[in-house]
Image (cartoon, rainbow, N blue to C red):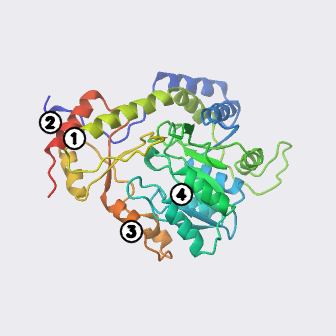
């Protein structure tokens, strides 16, 4: 089959099937379509997958981050160290709490927070830090041992932004179990989806209780509104999809890893740098992200051969208009933003698709 004969290969593709449709139909027929027992079951099942005691479902990944930070006590005037190389929701959630996001640069190979830069960012501010918010970017766990040690030294909470890392593991433990709390997203492009949705997971009962109140108007079990809160609740419809997707998550991640291995093999002679996977971590490959100094040329070349790509993220957070007051520079993040591009790696990528991508990459020549 020639490259011209092959289908257009999307960079993301939700894997939804008949079981999801049937479960949604059952919820619709029950009439109990808002928050309810389906959500409670999804919370329990997802928490078990993460090896933690509690899960609190939310309406999306951003509200999960906001809730996790608030539940860990982050509020007005606090300081949270995080990465400038992520989706803007990471830093926005800090600001929604009334806290200040303080950026630290990233590792040039993994694109995750650099622990040395985290320490420097804290020390520049005289040790003033209330939380560290690492992102497991593209599905690769951040260096949690070093980050947790720094946070403990400064008596700071650790909140994992695991929005892209369902199924990833660090030192044989699932992400979501490595900090005081973690936040996941179930957006359609993620490793599993509920359409829109999020989840806070934690082993801390007090954190979980605060999260439950915060997503439900600050209400306790007696219907007293004991504090300010939001309506960040998930619906039974979304949870029904999520419960089916969760059963398929290990298969989804296995397919992503198989596709990633094939892509890495295909890139052996190509003039681009494949993802780095450090020892002791299991990458979930939400994205398969390569570095190409002549990125625009590579994107155009792959597009000409029917292969979609994604650039995540072309503008680092500190350079976004909403963060124009940030005057620090983060050269490693800025270079990554100018050079990285993601290739199709999702479970819908077939063996034929992998061959088409490999053939296209073999023909690529940078300027």
Kindly tell me whether residue 9 is visible in this rendering.
no
Estimate how packed mark 3 is, as few (under 14), some (14 to 19) or many (20 or more) residues with alpha carbons within 10 Å: few
Left/right placement of residue 247 relative to residue 211 reads: left
Question: Which residue is more in the foreground, 325 or 162?
Answer: 162
Q: According to the image, label 2 marks what residue?
A: 4
Calculate the distance from the C-alpha at mark 4 to the C-alpha at mark 1.
32 Å
CB within 8 Å, label 1 to label 2: yes
Q: Position of residue 352 (x, y in %)?
A: 24, 28
Q: Earlier in the sequence, mark 4 or mark 1?
A: 4
* Dot placed on the residue nearer the N-terminal end, 1 or 3: 1
Q: Of the residues tagged 2 and 4, which is closer to the observer?
A: 4
Tag 1 residue: 306
For mark 4, does the 10 Å Cα neighbourhood hold few (<14), some (14 to 19), or many (20 or more) residues? Answer: many
Question: What separation in Å lies between label 1 and label 2 (alpha carbons)?
Answer: 8 Å
Total numbered badges shown on the rendered structure: 4
Displayed quadrant of residue 366: bottom left
Which quadrant: the C terminus? bottom left
């Amino acid at each position: 089959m020639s490259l011209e004969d092959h289908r257009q290969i999307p960079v993301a593709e939700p894997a939804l099937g008949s079981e999801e449709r049937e479960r949604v139909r059952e919820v619709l027929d029950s009439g109990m379509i808002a928050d309810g027992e389906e959500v409670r079951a999804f919370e329990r099942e997802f928490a078990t997958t993460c090896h933690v005691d509690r899960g609190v479902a939310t309406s999306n990944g951003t509200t999960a981050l906001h809730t996790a930070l608030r539940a860990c006590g982050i509020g007005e005037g606090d300081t949270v160290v995080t990465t400038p190389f992520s989706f803007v929701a990471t830093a926005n959630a800090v600001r929604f709490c009334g806290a200040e996001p303080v950026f630290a640069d990233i590792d040039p190979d993994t694109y995750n927070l650099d622990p040395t830069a985290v320490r420097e960012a804290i020390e520049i501010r005289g040790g003033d830090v209330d939380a560290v918010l690492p992102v497991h970017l593209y599905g690769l766990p951040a260096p949690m041992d070093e980050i947790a040690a720094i946070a403990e030294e400064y008596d700071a909470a650790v909140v994992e932004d695991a929005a892209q890392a369902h199924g990833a593991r660090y030192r044989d433990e699932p992400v979501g179990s490595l900090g005081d709390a973690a936040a996941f997203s179930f957006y359609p492009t993620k490793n599993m989806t509920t359409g829109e949705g999020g989840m806070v997971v934690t082993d801390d009962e007090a954190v979980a209780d605060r999260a439950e109140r915060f997503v439900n108007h600050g209400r306790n079990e007696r219907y007293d509104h004991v504090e300010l809160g939001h309506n960040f609740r998930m619906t039974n419809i979304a949870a029904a999809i999520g419960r089916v997707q969760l059963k398929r998550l290990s298969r989804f991640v296995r397919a992503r890893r198989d596709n990633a291995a094939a892509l890495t093999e295909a890139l052996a002679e190509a003039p681009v740098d494949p993802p780095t996977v450090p020892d002791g971590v299991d990458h979930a490959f939400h994205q398969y992200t390569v570095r190409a100094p002549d990125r625009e040329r590579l994107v155009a070349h792959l597009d000409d051969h029917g292969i979609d790509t994604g650039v995540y993220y072309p503008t680092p957070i500190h350079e976004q208009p909403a963060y124009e007051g940030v005057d620090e520079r983060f050269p490693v993040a800025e270079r990554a933003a100018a050079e990285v591009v993601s290739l199709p790696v999702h479970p819908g990528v077939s063996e034929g698709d992998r061959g088409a991508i490999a053939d296209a990459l073999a023909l690529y020549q940078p300027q």
